[in-house]
Image (cartoon, rainbow, N blue to C red):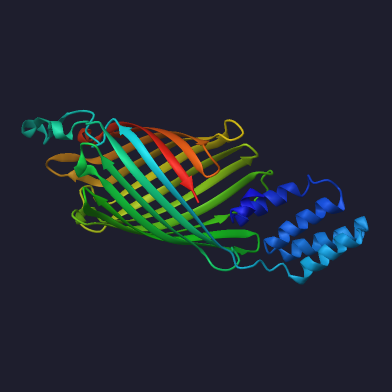
């Protein structure tokens, strides 16, 4: 099974549970299922299947010998240590690389002190092309012992707007565990972002989620989770803060298509005197991943997010609370070129609506990538 080969034990178990009621009623088919469970460390399930094979099918000596060998291992999976690495090289176009204001006209003050102004051309939308490189590396261990570790590197260089060149380095750990019928996953990450070749932001984050045991139909799963992030801006400390978030996720998985629905709430607590103070938000995501053909995969997602500040943004100048509503549509397609290389195309359309006009902007991104997976 692909999920087992890639070290995704949780997905492999879900697939085996769905397969159990569909396999042929023969000793060989049941033996294959038992061996797969044993390789995942599910000794109790494997033993129950071995016993069922012996009592129902009167298997030949060859199968009995295989069962004896499997029992001798006590279904203790060997410590796995799999490293998966991918390299992606991208060429793209951004219609609004600098996130320039859609409406160049704005005002400050009120009444007789109201002043009408126009955003300078440098802060209006400017398009540009870019080149990017991404490297992802993940080390996978057995889910019963150890943890996953990963590191990600992102670099983007614009053809003209070099002061907007970005870089990011993220490293983290993930671990899963189970309590009765509840399956948990936790992660801790630390990251660094640069802008224009200078340090921009440092962030640390912890997250945890739980797969809730519910009487949902086969293929459905329900997850709840939460996280806490701490951000520090190198040259803009007034934006430092903590973000606390919680979410739920409902997923429907079928052989060639997977739907996912996410919704959550966020609270951003300012550490210093940030314009607008603390803010609260909500978000929702709908995504679908499917096969267009036997080897071609595609994904589409729609994300809505809203933030509302607690205080007036700049008393005396901008006497309203900042209200930000953004919508992001993304579609991608992955086409295999060889066994390990892929051609990937992606389109993004972003609309950021704000009641403070100078912050509102729109952007369309088109990019083509070559990806190599080790």
How many numbered badges does the structure rendering display?
0
Q: Residue furthest front?
A: 338
| Figure check: 29 above or below 96 | below
> What x and y, as percent, mark residue 8?
59, 54
- Residue at 65%, 59% (x, y): give it: 181
Quarter assignment of residue 230: bottom left
Nearest the eye: 162 or 223: 162
| Figure check: 145 above or below 293 | below
> What x and y, as percent, mark residue 360?
26, 34
Could you tell whether 221 is left or right of 98 in the image?
A: right
Quarter assignment of residue 77: bottom right
Could you tell whether 263 is left or right of 240 in the image?
A: right
Q: Residue furthest left?
A: 112
> What x and y, as percent, mark residue 16?
71, 51
Q: Residue furthest right?
A: 58
Residue 171 visible? yes
Residue 273 visible? no
| Figure check: 355 above or below 203 | above
| Figure check: 142 above or below 275 | below
Nearest the eye: 1 or 301: 1
Nearest the eye: 10 or 308: 10
> What x and y, as percent, mark residue 223?
55, 51
């Amino acid at each position: 099974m692909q999920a087992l080969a890639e070290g995704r034990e949780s997905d492999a178990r879900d697939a085996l549970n769905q397969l159990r009621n569909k396999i042929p009623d023969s000793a060989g088919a049941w033996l294959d299922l038992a061996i797969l469970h044993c390789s995942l460390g599910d000794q109790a399930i494997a033993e129950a299947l071995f016993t069922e094979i012996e009592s129902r099918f009167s298997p030949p000596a060859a199968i009995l010998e295989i069962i004896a060998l499997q029992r001798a291992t006590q279904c203790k999976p060997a410590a796995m240590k799999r490293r998966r690495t991918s390299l992606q090289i991208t060429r793209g176009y951004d219609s609004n690389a600098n996130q320039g204001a859609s409406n160049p006209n704005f005002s400050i003050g009120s009444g007789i002190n109201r002043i009408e102004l126009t955003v300078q051309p440098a802060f209006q939308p400017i398009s540009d092309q870019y080149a990017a490189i991404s490297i992802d590396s993940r080390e996978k261990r057995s889910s019963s012992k150890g943890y996953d570790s990963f590191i990600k590197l992102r670099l983007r260089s614009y053809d003209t707007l070099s002061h907007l060149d970005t870089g990011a380095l993220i490293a983290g750990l993930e671990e899963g565990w189970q309590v009765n019928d509840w399956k948990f996953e936790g992660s801790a990450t630390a990251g660094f972002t640069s802008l224009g070749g200078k340090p921009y932001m440092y962030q640390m984050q912890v997250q945890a989620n739980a797969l809730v045991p519910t009487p949902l139909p086969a293929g459905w799963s329900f997850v709840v989770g939460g996280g806490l992030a701490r951000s520090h801006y190198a040259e803009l400390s007034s934006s430092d803060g903590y973000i606390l978030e919680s979410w739920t996720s409902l997923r429907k998985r079928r052989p060639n298509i997977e739907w996912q629905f996410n919704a959550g709430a966020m609270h951003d607590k300012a550490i210093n005197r940030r314009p607008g103070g603390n803010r609260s938000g909500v978000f929702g995501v709908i995504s679908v991943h499917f096969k267009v053909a036997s080897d071609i995969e595609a994904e589409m997602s729609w994300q809505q997010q809203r933030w509302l500040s607690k205080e007036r943004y700049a008393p005396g100048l901008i006497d309203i609370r900042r209200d930000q509503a953004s919508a992001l549509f993304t579609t991608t397609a992955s086409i295999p070129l060889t066994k390990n290389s892929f051609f990937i195309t992606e389109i993004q359309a972003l609309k950021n609506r704000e009641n403070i006009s100078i912050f509102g902007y729109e952007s369309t991104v088109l990019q083509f990538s070559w990806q190599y997976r080790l």
